[in-house]
Amino acid sequence: MKREGFKSRLGFILVSAGCAIGIGNVWRFPFVAGQNGGGIFVLLYLLFLVVMGVPVLTMELAVGRASRKSAVLGYKALEKPGSKWHIHGWFCIFGCYMLMMYYTTVSGWMVSYFFKFAAGTFQPSMGAEEVGAVFSDLLASPAEMGVWMALTVILGFFVCSRGLQNGLEKISKFMMSALLILIVILVVHSLFLSGAAEGISFYLVPGIEKVKAVGLGNVITEAMNQAFFTLSLGIAAMEIFGSYMTKEHTLPGEALRICGLDTFVAIMSGLIIFPACFSYGVQPDAGPSLIFATLPNVFVNMAGGRIWGTMFFLFMTFASFSTVIAVFENLISFAVDMFGIERKKAVLINGVIVLIASLPCVLGYNVWSSLHLIGGRDVLDSEDFIVSNLLLPIGSLMYLLFCVTKFGWGFDKYFEECNEGEGLKYSKALKPYFQFVLPILIIAIIVQGLFR
């Protein structure tokens, strides 16, 4: 059966960037940047993105493009006879399921808040406690959370059931275009708020005092982590799109475009959030509370807040859903390639698996709220720890070693695949860096991630 490919280069870039642009990136990047010296953190982040993120991204794409296969079969097509690199492919697929076990729930929260703002649940008369109670009530209701999670899963697999070009590519083009338009409108609005200058200063002006307070080592570590995890590398989420690519353009050039779009959205998110928070005297904090308690409180007090809140959560819905359908495509493609079943059957089977596997995260906030797993973490944080601290970095190290050592595919074959086509090409002088320095940087991320 002939393998489907992207209809256009733009489709590939938007789908791949959509996979990379996730809610964790959108809400985590601004806060971490503000806490770690603002502009200094951003500069370090961009540096590590180029020296770490882009190379590993080209490796996943190269394995996909050279093999024209999904996770396990991609390794099998390129590995030396008798070697066992393909075993990692199974861990990649496990990682994709694991990621979706909690990502579908968080994506459901975004959809829920979009509808809540659109329907007028949040009123200008509401106080901070009432605004916060909306999120508490959502978490306390397994039925409500289950409905929004199931809606995300069903819609996601429905999009993928229509095929690569008519489903994933077409919807991603629409969502990413809408996301970029929404982000520009929201940024312009935030920049004209009364406290915008203070928010921008907190976010982007290099703060030497902040760096001294948290320590330069911590700032470097945080920048390295953010640059690495923002691209969802190590679980074949990007490899699958490499398998659909043409050979017209070099991989370093395409990887830079994906990273550029991902970084643009991350930085712009901060320009939405911080001016708004400072304008209304709200101190921004980390994690879900920023998105679901702090920001709704800002929108409630803002002129036209219902409209701005609706637009913001539509933006967040697109950011999360683009990742969901990209990872779903990987699961479907794997089932089709590995077991030779039809796409629609693969959609049905995976849909049922993901729906059932997502239930523990939904129940972890209510029925199973007393359940604490890894290091006292709740269900969602435990699942996230396994993906973010183990499967992503270890998986990225596996792709790296496969591509640059003689025991795997080998540097020369990877290098040739990388530079095929028009565009930016890697120099052979980078070989020692790829073989000796990059593995040490990734191992450092793995080690410090285990002791967080």
Image: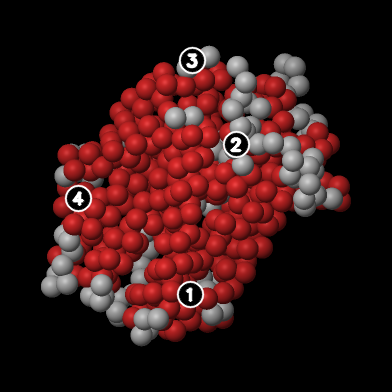
Q: Is residue 281 above or below residue 378?
A: below
Q: What residue type is labelled 2?
A: Phe
Q: Mark 3 points at which residue?
A: 341
The mark that comes first in sequence, 3 or 1, is 1
Is residue 384 or residue 47 the one in the foreground?
47
- Whole-number angstrom distance, CA of label 2 to CA of label 3: 21 Å
* Disc 4 versus disc 3: nearer the observer: 3
Q: Are marks 4 and 3 in contact (CB under 8 Å)?
A: no
Of callouts 2 and 4, the N-terminal one: 2
* Residue that extends furthest to the top in the rendered view of this protein: 340
Residue at position x 72%, y 24% from top?
A: 79
Q: Which mark is residue 6?
A: 2
Ranked by sequence position, the earlier of labels 4 and 1 is 4
* Labels 2 and 3: the sequence-earlier one: 2
* Residue topped by disc 1: 203
Between the residue at mark 4 and the residue at mark 1, the CA separation in whole angstroms equals 31 Å
Left or right of residue 106: residue 22: right
| Gap in angstroms between the C-alphas marked 4 and 3 | 38 Å
Callout 3 secondary element = loop
Give the alpha-carbon distance from disc 2 to disc 4, as whole Å.
Answer: 39 Å
Q: Residue at x 53, y 44 (%)?
A: 15
Q: Decide: marks 2, 3 in contact (CB < 8 A)?
A: no
Secondary structure under the numbered disc 2 in the rendered image: loop
Tag 4: residue type? Leu
Left or right of 449, for residue 424: right
Mark 1: few/some/many CA within 10 Å (<14, 14-19, 20+)? many
Measured Cα–Cα span from mark 2 to mark 1: 37 Å
